[in-house]
Amino acid sequence: MMNGTCRMILLLAWAHALMGTCAHGQGTGTLRFLVEPGDSYQFVLDGKYRMQEREVKLMEGPHTFTFWAPTRSIVDTVLRVQAGTTKDVILRLPYSPEYVAYQRELSQLKKEQWLGRVLPCAVTLGTGIWAVSSFVNYKDAHDQLEADEALYTSSASPNGLQQLKEVDVPVHQEEFAQARTNFYISGGVFLASAAFTTWSIIKASKKPLPTFEDKEKVKFDGLVWVPDRRGGTWAMGLTIPIR
Amino acid sequence: MKRLLPLLLPVLLAFSGCYKDDLDVSTWTNNPFDRDYTGPNVFSMDTTFIEIIGTPPNVITRQVMQFTVNSSLFLAPNAYQVRVKDLENDQIVLLSQFPVGSDVWRYTKLEFTFGQELCLEVRLSNNFSDGRPETICATLQ
């Protein structure tokens, strides 16, 4: 009986010692995350827990982390926690290929819109200035002919009248015809330019904007099953196009 | 189209105010100073008479031809001179107004013959150039 009791005590002492050793080996450590982007990243710990913390205290040993942030790619990594220490984890999440492609398409679209709007507008402005300038010349040429007509009425110089009729008026009529032709050409070019600009602007405004679908978010949301009181729910992702 | 209108409006307005080159100098013939003048006669003979000036023994007797310029035909009020060519001796003189400011002119001639018609070629003159010639005649009775 006594022998059995002693054996039991020894067994308990060994178990206690063993448990104490084990408990001492399962100490906790802290991981402090310095992740870019710092305001929106999330991570899944050990494939189970979805979190959005800047600092976590974990049992020592290796832990798997899956980081993600909107517009960024998922980054999987294993971090080893050392008991009693705080470790800084510096990580920059790369942009997802979809987001890079979206940005490229958006940039291309902006470039096309600039070319389709600003450039034709500038050309139209230039041709408009040309048309206005031509019109001013046209009007001046006409005013000159009117002045000639008035001079014929007021002049009392026979030689001056002859000069006016035989030289000045024909020259001014030629200048008037030239100015009128220039005005018609410049006006036509301006009209064509304005029409093209309008068409170009309408065309540019009708071109659909590229949409961004964050596939990485869908993947990330699908990583974790989040339990609730009723037993659980599936986490789903909703992608909203960024315009 | 709504965007197009503000752009096209100035051009449309400009086109709506198009000017026409309807000047035809061949129809400019109503200025009496113009050599191509086709209106009514500017000059009209008033009278001719003998004028005696001076005191004996230095007395001068001459023929006066008095004529009038119809300045109402002028398109604008203008000062002018008259160039006279005596068609009897082809002598040319440039006259000034007498009295000044009036449209009555006088041409005098020392050699004259009673009963003989004397004709003058008269033109409006300015700036050393002359207008359309007209002929006026009178007979000294």
Image (cartoon, helix red, strand yellow):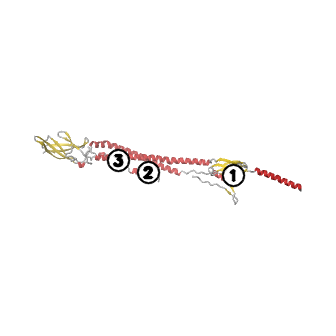
Classify mark 1: helix, strand or loop: strand
Query: Crowding near pointer 1: few (<14 within 10 Å), some, many (20+)?
Result: some
Front one among B113 and A75 = A75
Amino acid beneath label 1: Val
Residue A120: where, in percent of width, then height?
48, 47
Question: Gap between marks 2 and 3, in whole Å?
Answer: 25 Å
Camera sees residue A74 = no
Which marked residue is nearer to the observer: mark 2 or mark 1? 1
Q: Are marks 1 and 3 on the same chain?
A: yes
Q: Which residue is mark 1?
A: A56
Task: Evaluate if marks 1 and 3 touch, with contact meaning CB atoms under 8 Å apart.
Answer: no
Question: Gap between marks 2 and 1, in whole Å?
Answer: 68 Å
Q: Is residue A89 left or right of residue B121?
A: right
| Quadrant in which the C terminus of chain B is drawn | top left
Which marked residue is nearer to the observer: mark 1 or mark 3? 1
Amino acid beneath label 2: Leu
Look at 40% across and 51% down and name the residue there: B13
Q: Is residue B85 left or right of residue A201?
A: left
What chain does badge 1 belong to? A
Q: Which residue is mark 2?
A: B8
Q: Is residue A143 left or right of residue A52?
A: left
Look at 56% across and 48% down and name the residue there: A106
Classify mark 3: helix, strand or loop: helix
Badge 1 or badge 3: first in the primary sequence: 1
What chain does badge 2 belong to? B
Circle on res. A143: 3
